[in-house]
Image (cartoon, rainbow, N blue to C red):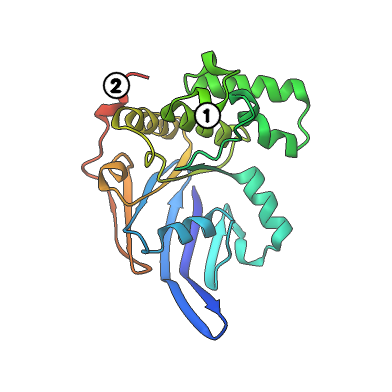
Amino acid sequence: MELISVTNLKKNYVNEELITPVLNGLTFSIKLGEFVSIMGPSGSGKSTLMHILGFLDTLTSGSYIFAGQDVSTLVDDELALMRRHKVGFVFQSFNLLPRLSALENVTLPLIYSETPRLERQERGLKMLASVGLSHRLSNRPSQLSGGEKQRVAIARALINNPEVIFADEPTGNLDSKSGLQVMKIFQDLSASGHTIILVTHERYTAEHAARIIQIRDGQIISDEPNEHRKVYELHANS
C-alpha cells in the first residue's frame, strides 16, 4: 500500500524579492512499512523535504499525497492534526523537557490529545519497555546517557501510534555503540511494520535502511534498494 506519493514537488523560499529554490521537482513514493533513508550533504534540501513530508512546512508547487489525502489542500489547523496523529519525530538533539521524567516526556503528546491519565501511564510504560528503558521511568534527561535520551525520544515518537516515524540525524549526538542500539530499534520497528524515514548525511547510517534516496542541490540523484544494508547490528546488545 502506498503511504506517501510526491510528484514534481518544489519548494522556494522568498525573502523580499529574492527567491531561493530549495527543492527542484522531486518525484517518488514510499510504501507503508518501508524503511527509507533520505541522504544528502548539508544544504541539499533533505531537511526541508522532511519538514514538508512531516507537515511542518508547505510545498510551493507539485503534489504531496499522504494516505490518499492531498496535503496541499490542508490549512494550518488540519496540518497540525496530521502532525499530532499521523507522524512521530526523532531529532538529533532529543528535544526532551529537562524537568520532566522519562515517563512524563514520553506521555507528553497524549496530554494535548486529552487522553485520560491512567491510559497515558499505561501507554508510556509500554513504549519505554519497547525501547528497553523500564528501569529509567523516573529519571530526568540529565540522569540519562545520550543513547538513553534518544530511546526516550523514540518512545515518545511512538506514543500516538503514528503511521510514519521521521528520524532526523538520530545518531548525530551519540557514540558508535549507542548509535548502533538506536539503529537496531529502528530496524526492529521496521520489521514489525512501522514506516521509517531516516534523514542523514552519513552513508554509514543510511545503510541501515532498505532503500536510499540521495539528494543533492534539491534534486534526487539516485533512488535505489540498499544492496549493502547493515543488518548484523540487529544482534548488538540493547
Q: Which residue is mark 2?
A: 235
* Residue positioned 70% across, 34% down in the render: 110
Q: Tell me: 176 left or right of 115.
A: left
* Residue positioned 71% across, 56% down in the render: 78
Q: Which residue is mark 1?
A: 152
For the view shown, which residue lies furthest in the top direction? 135
Of circles 2 and 1, the one toward us is 1
Considering the numbered disc 1 on the image, is that residue within a helix, a strand or a loop?
Answer: helix
* Residue positioned 66% across, 45% down in the render: 84
> Which residue type carries mark 2?
His
Depth check: give the residue in front, 23 or 201: 201
For the view shown, which residue lies furthest in the bottom direction? 17
> Which residue type carries mark 1?
Val
**Mark 2 in CB contact with mark 1 (< 8 angstroms):** no
Depth check: give the residue in front, 157 or 73: 157
Circle 2 crowding by C-alpha within 10 Å: few under 14, some 14–19, many from 20: few
The picture places residue 157, in percent across and down from the top left corner, at: 56, 37
Q: Is residue 194 above or below residue 7?
A: above
* Disc 2 from disc 1: Cα separation: 21 Å
Depth check: give the residue in front, 97 or 28: 97
Q: Is residue 182 above or below residue 7?
A: above
The picture places residue 148, in percent across and down from the top left corner, at: 46, 26
* Residue positioned 42% across, 35% down in the render: 190
Quadrant assignment, res 237: top left
For the view shown, which residue lies furthest in the left direction? 228
The picture places residue 35, in percent across and down from the top left corner, at: 39, 42
Considering the numbered disc 2 on the image, is that residue within a helix, a strand or a loop?
Answer: helix
Circle 1 crowding by C-alpha within 10 Å: few under 14, some 14–19, many from 20: many
Q: Which mark is residue 206?
A: none
The picture places residue 203, in percent across and down from the top left corner, at: 26, 48
Q: Earlier in the sequence, mark 2 or mark 1?
A: 1
